Image (cartoon, rainbow, N blue to C red):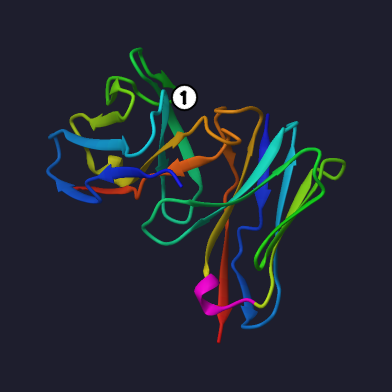
Amino acid sequence: SQKIEQNSEALNIQEGKTATLTCNYTNYSPAYLQWYRQDPGRGPVFLLLIRENEKEKRKERLKVTFDTTLKQSLFHITASQPADSATYLCALGRGAGNMLTFGGGTRLMVKP
Amino acid sequence: GAVVSQHPSRVICKSGTSVKIECRSLDFQATTMFWYRQFPKKSLMLMATSNEGSKATYEQGVEKDKFLINHASLTLSTLTVTSAHPEDSSFYICSAYTRQGSGTEAFFGQGTRLTVV
């Protein structure tokens, strides 16, 4: 069965450092992978999408890589700030309008 | 970006009563909406796919008679938790896709915290 794994333990880093979150998947061939941010008591908010034929995507301080051979995506936040503290979810999908399958999320804590 | 509005954000109800949660796409038409349930510190669990003008598709293990879904228009889907019990207490979130641009981005509602006492 499909499985998406994110580090369930919280990631604690110091302000200004780069945070790196991992998303691994098995038994799945996604056409694209997405990253979402979720704050407590709120719905997820879309951050980035990367397609299967793309290796890397950037948006401001965010960078996502996608390795379909390793079946892994890395999500980086450079120059992290306390405001970046949240839970980050990865999600995989196959086609336009297709339902997404979510990972368990990783909680990031950026300390000042 | 597209906006999905979910209401109410919080609701407390007595055991045995029913609760309706609304999910609206404010500036786009959504032929398909999704309803999720999320337990504390857990990921989103897909409950059902809501299709405009037709019956919802429920995931395995989700009771369709307990979680009634109605997608009456292209901008509104409702989830009714019938005869609620304390174990139904959870965070419920809806989402919708747009078919503009990549057409693969999901927009989520704010979520509804349901507490059954």
Give above or below for A7 relative to B68. below
Chain ID, mark 1: B
Which quadrant does the C terminus of chain A fall into?
bottom right
Magenta region: A80-84
Q: Name which residue lies at 29% across and 29% down.
A: B76
Image-based side of A69 in relation to B24, left or right: right
Which element type, helix, strand or loop, lies under badge 1? loop
In this view of the protein, can residue A108 be seen by the observer?
yes
Residue B72 in the figure: left or right of residue A20: left
Q: Which residue lies furthest to the top in this view?
A: B54
Membership of B47 in magenta stretch: no
Q: Among all residues in the image, which is located at the extreme right?
A: A69
Q: In this view, does A36 lie above or below B21?
A: below
Residue A89, position as x, y percentages in the image: 57, 52
Q: Which residue is drawn at 18% across and 30% down?
A: B83
Q: Residue at x 67, y 38 (%)?
A: A3
Query: Which residue is located at x 64 percent, y 27 percent?
Result: A95
Magenta stretch prevailing secondary structure: helix
Number of numbered discs present? 1
Q: In this view, does A53 lie to the left or right of A5?
A: right
Magenta stretch contains residue A82: yes
Residue position marked by numbered label 1 in the rendering: B59
Of the pair A63 and A60, the residue shown nearer to us: A60
- Residue A8 x, y percent position in the rendering: 61, 58
* Vertical position of residue A46 compared to residue B81: above or below: below
| Quadrant of the drawing holding the N terminus of chain A | top right
Q: Which of A46 and A73 is in front in this view?
A: A46
Say what amino acid the circle numbered 1 marks.
Glu
Question: Residue B64, percent across and down?
Answer: 33, 20
Measuring from the top left, give residue A42's x and y in whole percent.
38, 55
